Amino acid sequence: MDNLVPSGHTKLDISIPPYVPLIVGASLIIAAALGSYVFYAVHAMDNVLSVTGSAKVPVTSDTVKWKISLAQTALASNLQAGYPLLAQDVEATTAFLKSNGIPADAITVSQVYTEEVYKYNQNDTGPREYNLRQEITVQSNDVQGIDVLSKRINELSSKGVFVQWNNIEYFVSNLPELRVSLLGDAIRDAKARAEQIAKAGGQNVGSLKAASSGVVQVLSPNSVEVTDYGSYDTQSIEKEVMVTARATFFVR
């Protein structure tokens, strides 16, 4: 075979050192090991379960806000005549409230609002009229008493008082404390749901990884009108306060 090498050329030695296969083999083993570790790490990061839980409790409103709007109509040419009449209505209304046990410091009287009466017929060339309006607000902790009294507001009509509208709202004063107490129950509800889901998949729920509180829903009894940004029913004395929580658990 040496005769096949042309004259004037040097024969190359291409023999592979004995340690090179060892290095290549070791590199392949290390690469395989690293690949297995990365796969396991990524898989482990996904080994969690996120569930939403909720908790609800019935509550009774302990604060009430009652607004009474009084109005008088006056011609634009005789607007000043309406103010004394409205003042008489306010006096009669506050007297009615005080005579029924409402303390003076629970009653607030607003300024006078003046609004032009809108004419639906644009061809009406009659004189312009204005509504003179004043609001009386009652805030109290006597929820049941105010509720009963608000239904008697029509008694003022016998005194010539025109009640434009009558609105009453009921609130829960300890809502922040309720939210905190319900949050723990919502997390426990989330874990119970997570355990059922994990069990169906042949896994077990581990420790809590993360949790976040949802919005508070203050609902009328048996209501399902929840919203993403929270809701607050003010028309019912009896309410239900609901809190949701989003919880993420490790599963194994």
Image (spheres, rainbow, N blue to C red):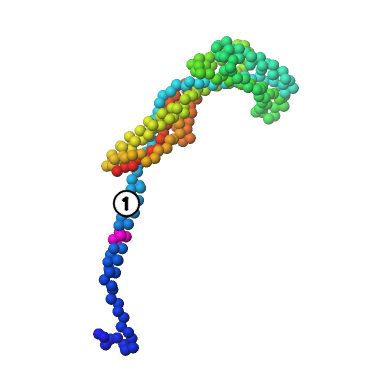
**Does any portion of residue 147 appear in the rendered image?**
no
> Could you tell me which quadrant the C terminus lies in?
top left
Amino acid identity at mark 1: Tyr
Query: Is residue 107 shown above or below 6?
Result: above
In the image: residue 64, left or right of residue 240 = right
To which quarter of the image does residue 191 belong? top left
Label 1 crowding class (10 Å Cα cut-off): few <14, some 14-19, many 20+? few
To which quarter of the image does residue 127 belong? top right
- Residue 29 on the magenta span: yes
Q: Secondary structure at mark 1?
A: helix
User: Looking at the image, which residue is at 33% across and 42% down?
Assistant: 250
List x then y, in percent, for residue 83.
Answer: 69, 19
The secondary structure that most of the magenta stretch takes on is helix
Residue bearing mark 1? 40
List x then y, in percent, for residue 207.
Answer: 33, 39
What segment carries the magenta color? 28-32
Query: Is residue 93 shown above or below 122?
Result: above
> Could you tell me which quadrant the N terminus lies in?
bottom left
Q: Nearer the viewer, residue 198 or 179?
A: 179
List x then y, in percent, for residue 35.
Answer: 32, 57
Q: Nearer the viewer, residue 151 or 218?
A: 218
List x then y, in percent, for residue 142.
Answer: 50, 16
User: Looking at the image, which residue is at 69% across and 20% down?
Assistant: 74
The extreme left residue here reads 1
The extreme right residue here reads 77
User: Looking at the image, which residue is at 62% across and 11% down?
Assistant: 159
